Image (cartoon, coloured by chain):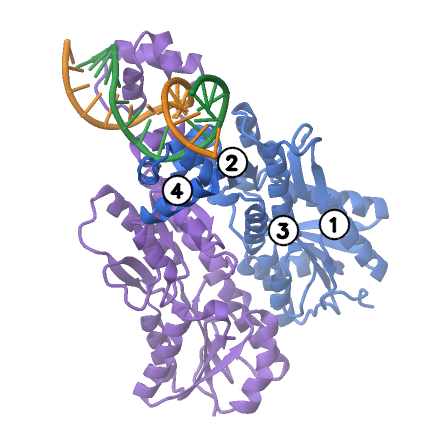
Chain colours: A purple, B blue, C orange, D green
Amino acid sequence: MRDVARLAGVSVATVSFVVNDSKPVSPATRLRVESAMVELDFRRNAVARALASRRTRIIALLFPVLQHRLSDTAARFFTGAAEAASELGYTVVLWPEPSDPGALRELTSGGLVDGVILMEVRLDDRRVDQLLEAHTPLTLIGRTRDPSGLDYVDVDFEGMVEQAIDRLHGLGHRDLVLLEELEREDLDGYGPVVRVGETFRAVCAERGLTGRTLRCDANPAGGRAVASTLLEEMPEATAMLVLNDRAATGLVSELGHRGISVPRDLSVVLIGSTIEVAETADPELAVLVSPAAQLGRMGVETLVGRLDGTLGELRQELVMGAFLEGASLAPPPG
Amino acid sequence: MRDVARLAGVSVATVSFVVNDSKPVSPATRLRVESAMVELDFRRNAVARALASRRTRIIALLFPVLQHRLSDTAARFFTGAAEAASELGYTVVLWPEPSDPGALRELTSGGLVDGVILMEVRLDDRRVDQLLEAHTPLTLIGRTRDPSGLDYVDVDFEGMVEQAIDRLHGLGHRDLVLLEELEREDLDGYGPVVRVGETFRAVCAERGLTGRTLRCDANPAGGRAVASTLLEEMPEATAMLVLNDRAATGLVSELGHRGISVPRDLSVVLIGSTIEVAETADPELAVLVSPAAQLGRMGVETLVGRLDGTLGELRQELVMGAFLEGASLAPPPG
DNA sequence: TTGTACGCGTTATCAG
DNA sequence: CTGATAACGCGTACAA
């Protein structure tokens, strides 16, 4: 930049004005500066700019990649966020969560990113406190147990589970099962799992339905393996809610092998998955689609609004996903 | 840092020495500095450090998220890369490819990242030239048509296709089909598709086998839809290679509905997918697993080696994935 | 072993 | 409209 200034016969300040058009510059000198820039193949240095201006226009989407699979759904959060950021003149990068918690502070208070969007939030999430302590502009995708004072957007799992149950209830089902993931320390207090489980039990109780829980590994083999448990221990169950899409396809196909037909003998609803994954099963599963891309977008808009100061009040919003009927719903047999 | 120095009664240089232990410091003063640091809750500023040292120890994994789905396999590249980076004292972030190509130069010549790992490489990939021109340290996951002079690691699609064909041939199959994705401009010259297609045709010709190609949308619905084409136009085909896992599951289940059984009537091999996706189909598909995590790791190791100057020669390496038998292979019928 | 002083490439604040 | 110049926070010769 110094060189550009020299070649154009102006001061560095003027060059800076041209580069950012932060101040009016006469057409003549602007031209001289611009040609000098191409001449010297000038590229502004983002680091220096960040040091001087105290911002990078970069947002980190913090994702604990070692604890949570970067699923299809998670990928859509990222895509939605990336699109929105691009429109707003920001860049969002997917930042694997540092294993060392100290590294988190470094990242966040180091000035490399202007703000952080936190994913895979737990009810008691230490990361939130750490980030707040570091005064990092923060938006959650998900929410803690007590999210007061925090900007967040989240899937409305409660609403989705209620809708699913009511749909099944409306078809005549009275004996439901929720298929959950095996408990792992990693998942302890993980929002979606906790909220879906609690809502399931509460709504079943409210409606006078039987609501039981089954657990299996979060993959097709796990789903296959749990089929016998289901048939042996809960033969009266006629409908099922599944949070883990991978397990669902395995379960459905294994049931098929055992002569149990979906939806004739068992209705199945997927919670918070994608169309494509629901279509992968045979038959296509009913699914409450995760509004992932939309939430990614909203997360970025919220954080940017906070950064630019254009967002006044707190933003706390829950979003339901679309209900796709698929071919896995029917009245209970008999 | 200035404040820390003042509180500890030393100069900023000494504080810097302590922070980076770049010079010997007497235990006494070190202690004073350290306690001053905790007292003031000191956090070093990554941006300033980057400006002074000309490196950030951050690597960008450049992924064109708008053109390519961030699939399960792609996610594993990221995970593998993140692990390796962490071990080497680096951080790798997933950087969505800027839609504006000029923005790519900004990113790369701005000093925000020390180097770039390029994903979803095409045979003629402009990004490579742009990055080289900007003198950005660069490693490819994938490779261009002529990758001479470039560090790269890639899936050995040629070897994998050959292995798959030979396996099928060994079972007695002589009439093969390759299921490809519909042509899209986005995918024009995309390495995996081109190489798999070319190798398929070449190896079939060499072995005297019939090798034909079918195309469908890269999702379950696409696979379902292409089932009738297969049955009507290629009824003699007894085995199939599939590059798109999503389509494969749809095809297999639709064939089942039409009385065509895998593997009795048709053998199926998935190329470059994951165990879990292969297990999702019914029956479990044979699969040549993509060595994604390993390649992610190797990509990082290569780039870091280049950055640290510990890597001498060029690194150009192809990796095969494991062959899992699944339950979708059998001799041809009759 | 420690301190001084300069450089890193911009932005921002003045004054002109 | 333009130019000097002081930050920005840290690394690192070089000197002490």
Question: Percent position (x, y) of residue A291?
Answer: 37, 60
**What is the CA distance from the residue labelled 2 to the residue labelled 1?**
57 Å
Residue at the location (37% across, 35% down)? B10
Graded by Cα atoms within 10 Å as few (under 14), some (14 to 19) or many (20 or more), the crowding at tag 4 reads: many
Q: Is residue A274 above or below residue A164?
A: above
Contact between labelled residues 3 and 2, with CB atoms less than 8 Å apart = no
Residue occupied by mark 4:
B33
Residue occupied by mark 1:
B161
Q: Earlier in the sequence, mark 4 or mark 3?
A: 4
**What is the CA distance from the residue labelled 2 to the residue labelled 3?**
43 Å
Asked if both marks, 3 and 1, belong to the same chain, the answer given is yes
Residue at the location (42% across, 52% down)? A62
Q: Amino acid at mark 2?
A: Pro
**What is the CA distance from the residue labelled 4 to the residue labelled 3?**
45 Å
Q: Is residue A201 left or right of residue B322?
A: left
Q: Amino acid at mark 1?
A: Val
Asked if both marks, 2 and 3, belong to the same chain, the answer given is yes
Chain of the residue where label 1 is placed in the rendered structure: B
Comparing marks 2 and 3, which lies closer to the viewer?
A: 2
Q: Is residue A297 above or below residue B63?
A: below
Q: The residue tagged with tag 3: helix, strand or loop?
A: helix
Residue occupied by mark 3:
B292
Comparing marks 2 and 1, which lies closer to the viewer?
A: 2
Q: Earlier in the sequence, mark 2 or mark 1?
A: 2
Q: Is residue B177 above or below residue A35?
A: below
Q: The residue tagged with tag 4: helix, strand or loop?
A: helix
Asked if both marks, 4 and 3, belong to the same chain, the answer given is yes
